[in-house]
Amino acid sequence: MKPIRSLLFVPGNKESMLEKGAKAGADALILDLEDSVPHAEKQAARALVAGKIPELVAQGHRIWVRINRSAHIYDLDDILAVVQPGVEGLVISKPWGPEDIHMASCMIAEAEARANIEIGTVKLIPLLETARSMQLCFEIAEHPRVAAIVGATAKNADMARALRFVWTADGRESDYLKSRVVMAARAAGKQPIGGIWQQIKDLEGLEKASRLDRQLGMSGELVLHPMQVETVNRTYTPDADEVAYYQGMIDALDAAMAQGRASVMYDGEHIDIAHVKTAREIIELAGSFK
C-alpha cells in the first residue's frame, strides 16, 4: 500500500463536513460511521456515506470507512453499504485480538462477493484500543487483509483507559506501546500509524508529537481536523535538507566504491552500504508524495 502520512476522520452524518474534509489535502479520508455520529443518525449517515463514496473516489480520494461494532460482531449493514469499487478499506475499532480481524475479514469477503469485487481487495486498519489487542499486535498485523495498524494514544480515550496510563504532552508513558506497534507492523510488512492530537488549535504541540512518532518509526498519523493536515503531512515528508543530506551520502559512497572501497567518512561519520540503503529509501519516500 502506498504510504499514508495523514488519515483524516470526517463525520459521516454531515455532507458539508464530507465536502470540507475532501478539500483538506489529507492522504486519505476516514468517513466515520462510529464515534462521531450520534446513535439516532447512524442509518442516515450510512446512507449518506454510501452515496458519497463514488463521487469521492472519482475525485481521486483514498477512501476508508470506520464502521460500527455491536456487542458481538462488526455491523454487517455498514459493511454491505460501503464495500464498493474504489474503497481502499475499512477501519475497525476495539478488536480484542486476531479472531476479530478474521471475523471482520470474512464479513468483508461476503460483501465483496455480493458487490462483484475481487476477494481481498478491501483492506483493514484495526485501531488497537484494548490491552489484549496491544499484546497481540503482531498477530493482528500479520493478517493478509490488514494494511496498517494504529497505536493511537489520545488523551483520556480508549487506549489510555485500557492501559491506565496518564497522558502527558511529552508522551513518555506511551513510548513502549507505540514501539510495539511499530515493531509489529514492520515485522508484518505493514504501516504503523500514530496519533491522535486532540488539542486542535495547538499546531506547535501537534508538530512536536508527530515528530516524536516519526522518530519512533510511525509512518503517519490519524488526524481529527482539516487544520491539522498540513502540519502532519509536512512532518512525515522528508524535507529538502534531508533529501540533500542523503543524496550527498549516496554520492560519497558511489565515489568511494569507484575507488574500490565500500565505506567512507561523510559529514564526520563512518558510512557504508547499509547507510546508503537507508538513504535511498528516504529519498524514495520523499518522491512518493510529490
Image (tube, rainbow, N blue to C red):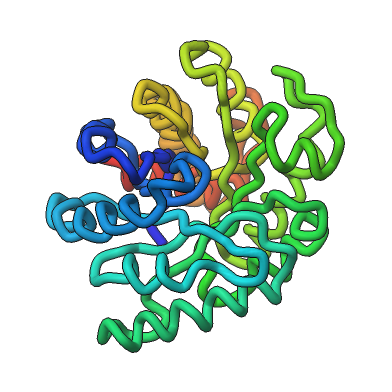
Number of dots carrying numbers? 0
- The one nearer the camera, 195 or 288, is 195
Confirm whether residue 229 shows in the render.
yes
Confirm whether residue 244 shows in the render.
no
Give the x, y percent position of residue 270: 67, 35
- The one nearer the camera, 13 or 39, is 39
Q: With respect to residue 79, does 51 lie above or below?
A: above
For this view, does 235 lie left or right of residue 162? Answer: left
- The one nearer the camera, 196 or 164, is 164
For this view, does 247 lie left or right of residue 125? Answer: left
x 62%, y 33%: residue? 213
Q: With respect to residue 179, does 97 lie above or below?
A: below
x 68%, y 35%: residue? 157
Give the x, y percent position of residue 116: 26, 86
Quadrant position of residue 176: top right
Give the x, y percent position of residue 48: 25, 52
Quadrant position of residue 72: bottom right
x 53%, y 77%: residue? 105
Give the x, y percent position of residue 1: 41, 62
